Image (cartoon, rainbow, N blue to C red):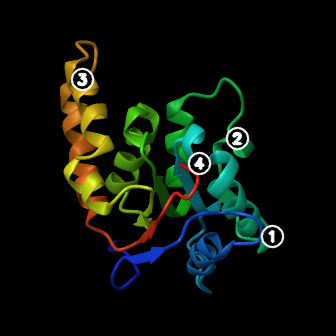
Amino acid sequence: AEGIFSPTKNVDGGIRGSNTEAWEEVLETLTPSPSSDGSEFEVFLSFRGEDTRKRFIGHLYEGLEDHSIPTFIDSEKLKKGEGIDKLLKYIKRSKIFVPIFSKRFAESKWCLKEVTKSVECGKEIIPVFFGVEPSDVRNQSGPFKSAFKVHQSNKKQDQEEVKKWREALKKVGNLSGFTLKDMNG
């Protein structure tokens, strides 16, 4: 599905003190619609943990939970020892896929597999560009370029899978979403 926004919104993503406008605006967009399709989770959050978990993601997840919006986040819902196959099943059981693209997102094969699976499943996708531009995602440029060089030079990495990752990022990078500045570095 195409994004539900008009043009990409630019929001100050610095979460400092009581400045919570960025995650509140994203939260408002994720409020459940009256119709239910039987999904276990309303929202699946996909992110590179070390980039965003203790800042933006923590606030967003807490806000979603406070508003009784069933949300999948790996640290809360994925049991220790469960692999990527189980994680991909959670994507199928979610209504909306929210990738939080950050500078090191493309270094994670898991993150790239999640985005690819969401595109393959035809999920509604609402991208959040956290400290990166949509064009970085769409074109695998900026911080995404070096990550893809590593993936392509890895002899053990299936290059057909890398091609699917690129195609998925191109599609998601073209969707309307939120562009947030990372005010914390």
In the rendered image, which residue does mark 3 sit on? Answer: 158
Q: CA distance from mark 1 to mark 3?
A: 41 Å
Q: Earlier in the sequence, mark 4 or mark 3?
A: 4
| Mark 4 or 1: the one toward you | 4
| Mark 2 or 4: the one toward you | 4
Using a 10 Å C-alpha cutoff, classify the residue at mark 1 as few (fewer than 14 neighbours), some (14 to 19) or many (20 or more): few
Asked if residue 96 is positioned above or below residue 78 in the image, the reply reads below
Q: Do residues under tags 1 and 3 come within 8 Å of each other at their CB atoms?
A: no
Name the element at disc 2. helix
Asked if residue 94 is positioned above or below residue 177 in the image, the reply reads above
| Mark 3 or 2: the one toward you | 2
In the rendered image, which residue does mark 2 sit on? Answer: 75
In the rendered image, which residue does mark 1 sit on? Answer: 66
Q: CA distance from mark 2 to mark 4?
A: 13 Å
Residue 141, horizontal then vertical, whole percent: 23, 47
Mark 2 belongs to which amino acid? Ser
